[in-house]
Image (tube, rainbow, N blue to C red):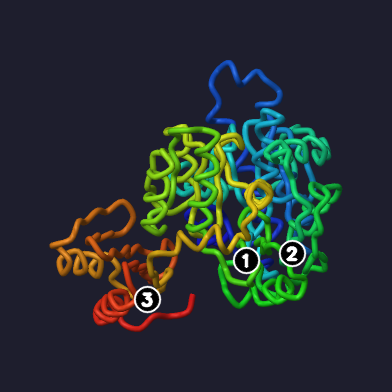
Amino acid sequence: MDPSIFKAYDIRGLYPEQIDEDAAWKIGHGSAQFLRSLLQGYERGLESMQTLVVGRDMRSHSPSVAGALIKGITGSGANVIDIGMIDTPQAYFAINHLKTCGGIQVTASHNPSQYNGFKISGQLARPISGDTGLQEIKHIATSLRHTEAAGQGKVVQMDLAEPYKRHVRSFLDSNLKKLKIVIDASNGMAGKWVPIIFGDLDIDITKINFEHNGTFKHDPNPLVEANLAELKQAVLDKRADMGMCFDGDADRLVVVDEKGKTIGCDILTALLACEFLKKSPGSTIVYDLRSSRMVADEVKKAGGVPRRERVGHSYMKKTLKESKAVFGGELSGHFYYRDNFFADSGMITLVQVLNILSASDKPISEMVAPLLQYKSTGEVNFEVEDKKGMMDALAEKYADGKIDYLDGVTVQYKDWWFNCRPSNTEPLLRLIIEADDAATLNEKFSELKGMLGEPVDH
């Protein structure tokens, strides 16, 4: 098994070169061993706690990979509830709904069709990442010799469409307007679950790329602006109220306004946060440190408590839970909800945007306009071999600013700030700069490029 498939937050690689059925069997076996080892004494006697939920996405090899994964889990003696072809957030719902010791979603998320992988969650859908168990699973899985003989685990198939639909729809306000929206499912899981969850609502949905044929018309990554071109054109052609593009496993999305302009995910975080704070006054809102200063400004203005956190879903979920935050958002398009087990959900985010549009007479572009006071580069990548050395050099050069090391190095001044953080898997530094005006932004970007070199596409 190629050990490089174990990433910071999940397991991912090319099929069948890096991830095949043999690797899936070992990962299933190792995951079940690890997740059951976390149980408290009294939990060990509960059958549901000896059980893992397994779901999969729509990739052509996912059924075969999921089948081998399930055999590995049952080979360890654990049981499996197979919930079929689902969006990743449904796995988080299922773990809590069925009270299992954890679960695994077979997916490569936003990667192209030749990739596959596994997102592993523990009890209560706690994320299993590099520092909370993936290394232990890697150790177990890479030392196993594949054998079909072994444990006695059972497999049950279950369709959770109805309870999952009820859960997502519980976030919907009662004043829904007859809206016109466009959804690009990116040939991913939103293509199955948007019709199931929202098909009977009195809204007009134009569907783009809802088909599942093993390929993607465009890469299922909504953060890449080029992947939004078809959605933007359809929003303009249909004169829609807004558009949404989901990633492959439908845990992330990007929103486009009625003019076909992309709404930054930090802008959407601020917009949604203010709505949550009306219903839960004084609550904490968590946001990742790449987000605009405007997020903290708006949360404070709305009477909430802003909580800045490092990048990554495992950190975001942990902080949401610890601070009992009502809501959180990341620049990557993950949005987290207290009443969704502190987990992220693309479908619930769709509901929240419908709520905002229904509660206002303004188009979404006008709601967003007051939040666009700062100028930003967005996240830009630079190829740097000595990542730590470069971050130390940046901290030294900008030592007169307010510096912190929550994630990489962040330096803040009154009229601008930047964050520079390392990639977990590549020789890359990721830079984001925000300033009060375009002139300052351009000046500081040129200054930092003088140290970091020219940006690269990644």
**Foreground tag (3 vs 2):** 2
Give x and y (percent) for residue 215: 76, 71
Residue 34, can we see it?
no
Mark 3 element type: strand
Q: Which of marks 1 and 3 is nearer the N terminus?
A: 1
Are discs 3 and 2 less than 8 Å apart at CB? no
Q: Residue 429 carries which label?
A: none
Label of residue 182 in the image = 2
Q: Mark 3: which amino acid?
A: Phe
The residue labelled by disc 3 is 382
- Counting other residues with Cα less than 10 Å from the Cα at mark 2, is it few (<14), some (14-19), or many (20 or more)? many
Please determine whether, in this image, residue 375 is positioned above or below residue 103.
below
Q: Residue at x 77, y 40 (%)?
A: 165
Disc 1 marks which residue? 256
Left or right relative to 186: residue 32: left
- Disc 2 and disc 1 in contact, CB within 8 angstroms: yes
Q: How crowded is mark 3: few (under 14 residues within 10 Å), some or many (20 or more)?
A: many
Decide if residue 64 is on the left or right side of residue 415: right
Separation of residues labelled 1 and 3 (CA atoms): 28 Å
Label 2 sits on a secondary structure element that is strand
Q: Distance between the residues labelled 3 and 2?
A: 35 Å
